[in-house]
Image: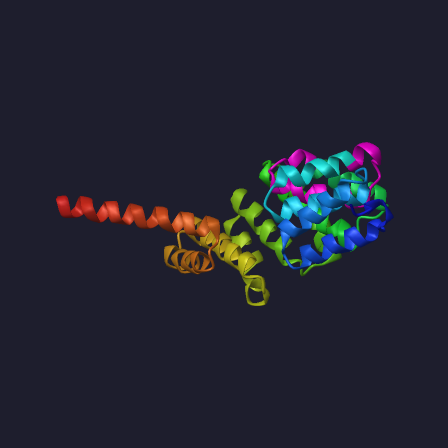
Amino acid sequence: MKDFMSIDPEDFFDRVTEALSREDFNVAEEVLAEYLESHSEDTQSRLLKSLIKEAKGDLLGAITPLEEILIIDNLNDLALYSLTNYYYMSLDCNKAIECCDRFIALEGTEDSEKAIDLRQIKVQSLYAQGKYSDALEEIEDLLKLNRKDEKMIVYKAKIFNINGSYDAAKNIVNPIIPVIADEGLLGHAYYVLATSYYRLGQTDKSDEFLNKSAELNDEFGMRWLKLKLAAEWNQQINQNNN
């Protein structure tokens, strides 16, 4: 039988990392299980276990080992950073906000790249909870650091739409449309514009941006377009029946 205790743990971790980089998640899981046959769980193995679970689409499985790390070491920045993301992805917005705030307190700055990443997630969490004033306040702070933060600009416009400031929302989003490289964000920006124009009574412009949004597979744009087409179809059937 192979003496696993004589093998440097880093060799196991390197093999897991290599398997993850190849997206060979089952092999990564097998190597980690092999390591745990002869070693107790530690911070590194829990972090890798979390990465494997997340890669396989098991968010709860990804969260649990990170929570275990924080029980042992409540100042572990990697666990706090990852948990902020995973809690938001699992729609546990309160915990996402809590982990974000804890991470920033630990970092001692709100301006680092990682802190800004988590503050963006905090904005999305506040927005999802309907706390639009708090979200807008956080957005304005982030835009002071980077006035070209496209994602936060789109969220700012969304909040303006919700508050009934449709013309202002349109004017916020329109200037950044040509520079948005991320298709997912661009699709959602089109959806925000479609909403603004619709509320302003400019249905032709609304339809134009709604179609653009759906072409880029924006979830909200596609849902709205399907409902719109269904309503038009029903209207046509009723007219034919009459």
Q: Is residue 137 magenta?
A: no
Viewer-proximal residue among 81 and 105 = 81
Q: Main secondary structure of the magenta part?
A: helix
Q: Position of residue 105 (x, y in %)?
A: 83, 41
Note whether 156 is above or below 205 in the view shown.
Answer: above
* Screen quadrant of the C terminus: top left
Q: Is residue 93 magenta?
A: yes
The reply, left or right, for residue 222 in relation to residue 98 is: left
Note whether 187 is above or below 235 in the view shown.
Answer: below
Q: Residue at x 66, y 42 (%)?
A: 86
Toward the front, the furthest residue is 1
Q: Position of residue 136 (x, y in %)?
A: 65, 45
Viewer-proximal residue among 113 and 29 = 29
What segment is highlighted magenta in the picture?
Answer: 69-95
Which scheme is used to colour this image of the protein?
Answer: rainbow
* Screen quadrant of the N terminus: top right
- The reply to whether residue 154 is in sight is yes
